[in-house]
Amino acid sequence: MRIGDPFILALSQSGQISMNLLPIYEALKKGMLSKNLVDKLVTRAQVASAIVDKIQSASGAKYPYWFASPYVLIMDDSAQMQQAILYSRLVPIIADDGKLNITIEITGPLLLYASKDTLLAAMAHEFSHYVDFSQRINDFRVQTAETSYTIHESLYTDEEALFDPSKIFGRHRSIIKSIDKKFQNGLSDDALNKKTLNLWISKSLPVKRIVPEDNNTDLPVRALMEYKIPEDVLKLIGNVKKK
């Protein structure tokens, strides 16, 4: 996790287009993405919105703000000669007023090429991180993230910071089954990886490279202390603890 890119912080300044797709439209304006590709992403965003509705209905809590990013994220560990594609992640953002906002980033290739089952698994997986992060804030257990120096350690940390999906989604076994099937040391989907490599990366579409330690966040104590966890999330956490 890390503090988001500057253009994400300006989300509240626009009310004319889908807030979830603002980074996509910004990329179109800059010539990073074609109009045809953006149109496809807009169509696929409807699938993501339906998935958000399903997750909210199953959990009883509102999904945090999510946004689609106009690039594929590649985590690069040159020391270990490893690379991994990151399709989604939890992104805490510190706004200009110093307040903390917790968002979820869905990369363009995930939105565009993932099957509905994979997209559901990824978005539900990130929601589980959101609930875990909220609980850590509530319990005063959020500190400067420990730096992960290898991809393996980074993926391991990702799984460790995951609130048990079976306790969040209860009887909605389809969501739990999707997460269990698709996540094995990170998102595992050969078809998605192939399409991302052939239809995105090989066509020189935007790529953002990070190293494992970039995927951590150092959050100001004041922002954490002043952050108000939504009541429905607190209720969900309380219900889960009773199980």
Image (tube, grey):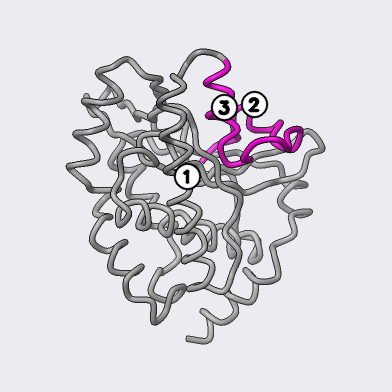
Residue depicted at x 64% and y 59%? 137
* Residue 118 in the figure: left or right of residue 171: left
Of the numbered discs 2 and 3, the one sitting upstream in the chain is 2
The three-letter amino acid code for the residue at tag 1 is Ala
- Residue 197 in percent (x, y) is at 23, 27
**Separation of residues labelled 2 and 3 (CA atoms):** 11 Å
Amino acid beneath label 2: Phe
The segment highlighted magenta reads 1-29
Q: Secondary structure at mark 2?
A: helix
Does the CB distance between marks 1 and 3 fall below 8 Å? no
Give the residue at mark 2.
Answer: 7
153 vs 182: above or below: above
Q: CA distance from mark 1 to mark 2?
A: 20 Å
Residue 172 locus on image (x, y percent): 38, 76
Number of residues whose C-alpha sits closer than 10 Å to that of mark 1, classed few (under 14), some (14–19) or many (20 or more): many
Q: Residue at x 32, y 71 (%)?
A: 174
How busy is the neighbourhood of tag 3: few (under 14 within 10 Å), some, or many (20 plus)? many
> Eyeballing the image, is 15 above or below 227?
above
Residue receiving disc 1:
45
Residue occupied by mark 3: 25
Question: Quadrant of residue 12 in the image?
Answer: top right
Q: Could you tell me how far apart the alpha carbons at marks 1 and 3 are, in whole angstroms?
A: 13 Å
**Residue 3 belongs to the span the image colors magenta:** yes
Q: Are marks 1 and 2 in contact (CB under 8 Å)?
A: no
In the image, 206: left or right of 95?
Answer: left
